[in-house]
Image (spheres, helix red, strand yellow):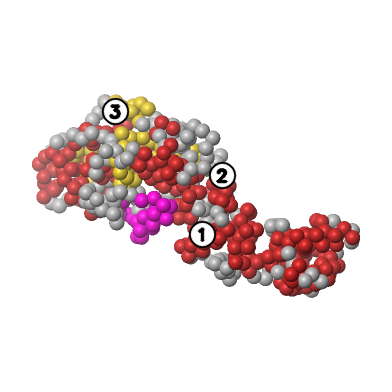
Amino acid sequence: MVKTRMAPSPTGEFHIGSMRTLLYNYAFAKKNNGKFVLRIEDTDRERYVEGSVERMLDVIRYCGLDWDEGPEVGGPNAPYVQSQRLALYKNYALQLVEQDHAYYCFCTPERLEKMRADQRAQGVAATKYDRTCLSLSSEQVQQNLAGSMPYTIRLKVPKDEVITFTDLILGRVDYPSNDLDDQILLKSDGFPTYHLGVVVDDHLMGITHILRGSEWLASTPKHILLYRMLGWEMPATGHLPNLKEVGANKKMSKRFGDVSVTEFLRDGYLPEALLNFIMLLGWNPGTEKELYSVAEFIRDFTVAKIHSTDLVAFDRERLAWLNGYYIRSLADRELCTRLLAWAQKWQVQFGFDVDLRSEKAVGVIFIVKDRMRTLGDFMLLASYFFTEPQVDKLELAKYSGGNQAAILQAFYQLYTEVGQDAWVVNHLDEISHDFIQKNGLTPKEAFMTLRFAVSGQSATPPIFDVLGLLGKDTVLRRIKSAMT
C-alpha cells in the first residue's frame, strides 16, 4: 500500500511551505488509494514552542484536511510523537555502534566550537567533525561510559564513495561521501537528531513515498547510508522546489509579510483559496485549469508534473486576486456566515458594531464584496455603514474646488424632498444626475463631494448604492454634519 507522511516540527507556526508539502503528500496517497500519516518530530527541544502542536493540528483541520494515522487519531504505529519513542531510537543507534556503522563521541561543546572556528579560520567552507573520537580504543570508550561522561553517537560515513540515487522529481543525483559530515544520530540528552528519527520512523511506519522540500536534498545521502546500514529499503523520495518571494533569489522570508498558514488565515484568506493557490506552487496540470478543489487536485495530481526547479515564486498579489475570486463566488448570506465564523475563530475585532446575521449586513456585503480581496477588507470597506465616518474638511474641499458648502446644501435640499418610499437606487440616480446637469456641475465634483461627505472615503461602491443602503435619515444627517 502507498503510504506518505508529513512530519512537522513544533518549533513555531506551521509554515505555508509545509502546508504545500503536506498537501502534495496527502494528494499522492489519496490518488493511489493509500494512507497519509501525520507525525510530530519534536526532538529539537531547544527550539520547541509550547502549544504549536495543537495549533498545527487545528490549522490543518481548519483547511479541511485530515490524516489516517497520527496524533488524536491513533493507528498501528502509535505513538506518533517522537519524544514518546526515544527508546526505539537509542536501540537502533546502539545497533549501529555494534555493527561499526556509528561511534561514541565524547567531545564537549566547547571543543567542537573551537574545532569549527579553527576550520573557518583556515578557509574551510563547510566545517566537519574531525573524527577525534573515532580513534578512541574500546577500553577508553568503556571507561568514559562507566564514568557517565556525556556522549553523542555519530554516523561513521564511509570514505571515497559516490552515493547515487534517483529522485522522483530531480532524477539522478550523485553525492560524494567525502563531502558528508559524521552526523550526530543520538544527542547527549537521549533525543535523536532528525536524521536518525526520520529514518527509523519512516521504516517502522511503512512509509513508501516521501515528498519534501529541497532543503533536505543534502541530507538524503545520509539517510541512504542509514537505510543501507540497518538493512532496510529506502522509500521513494522526491524533493520539492522551495518557495521564494517574487523577484527574490532565496527562500521566502517573513520580512516580506506572512509566512505561516495561521497568519494568512487570520488576515482573511479563505482556506479553499489558500489551498488552491499552493497547489500550483511547483505543480502544473499541463492545462489552462487554475481553479481546483482538493478533490479535483487529487484526481489530477502526478509527481511527473512537479517542477524540478530550485525555487518557485510565491506571488502574494496573485494569491490576493485568487482569494478575491473565491470571495465573490460566495452567496451574500454565505459570505456573512463565513465572516462571522472567521471573526470568531481568530478573535478579529471589526472596530464597529455589526450583526452579520442581519439583513443590513447582507445588503452591505452585496455592494462591497466585489472590492474585497480578503475577509479583512470588510473592516475598511464597510465601516461607514455601521459607524459615523470621520470627514476631513480639507480633504472634502479638494473635490469641490472649495464649493463644498453650496454643493452639499443643494443635495440636502434635493434629498429632503424625496419620500421614504421613493428612496431607491434608480430614483436617486435619476434625480441626482438631473440636478447636477441643471446646476452646471460635473459628476466628479458633485458626486465625489457627496461620496466623501457621507462615507469619509474617496473610493466606495457606486454612490447611489451607498445612499440607498444608508437610508434617507442617515444620508441627510451626514450631509448636514459635513456642511458644519
Q: Is residue 62 magenta?
A: yes
- Estimate how packed mark 1 is, as few (under 14), some (14 to 19) or many (20 or more) residues with alpha carbons within 10 Å: some
Asked if one can make out residue 159 in the rendered structure from this viewpoint, the answer is: yes
Where disc 2 sits, the SS reads helix
Badge 2 vs badge 1, beta-carbon distance below 8 Å: no
Label 3 amino acid? Ile
Residue 65 x/y as whole percent = 39, 50
Q: Earlier in the sequence, mark 2 or mark 1?
A: 2
Decide if residue 127 is in sight here.
no
Q: How many marks?
A: 3
Lower sequence index among marks 3 and 1: 3
Label 1 residue SS: helix
Residue in the picture at 61% in, 56% down: 369
Query: Residue 351 or 183: which is nearer the viewer?
Result: 351
419 with respect to 133 (left or right): right
Q: Position of residue 2 (x, y in %)?
A: 29, 38
Of residue 356 and residue 164, the one placed in the foreground of this image is 356
The question of residue 254 being in magenta is answered with no
Residue on which disc 2 sits: 318
Q: Which mark is residue 163?
A: 3
**Residue depth check, mark 2 versus mark 1: number of the one nearer the observer:** 1
Q: Nearer the viewer, mark 3 or mark 1?
A: 1
Q: Type of residue at label 2? A: Arg
Q: On the picture, is 40 further left or further right than 384?
A: left
| Mark 2 and mark 3: Cα distance apart in space | 40 Å
Look at the image and give the residue range highlighted in magenta: 39-66
Q: Quadrant of the C terminus?
A: bottom right
Kindly report the secondary structure that dominates the magenta region of the rendered protein.
Answer: loop
Which residue sits at x=89%, y=61%? 439
SS category of the residue bearing label 3: strand
- Residue that numbered label 1 is attached to: 338
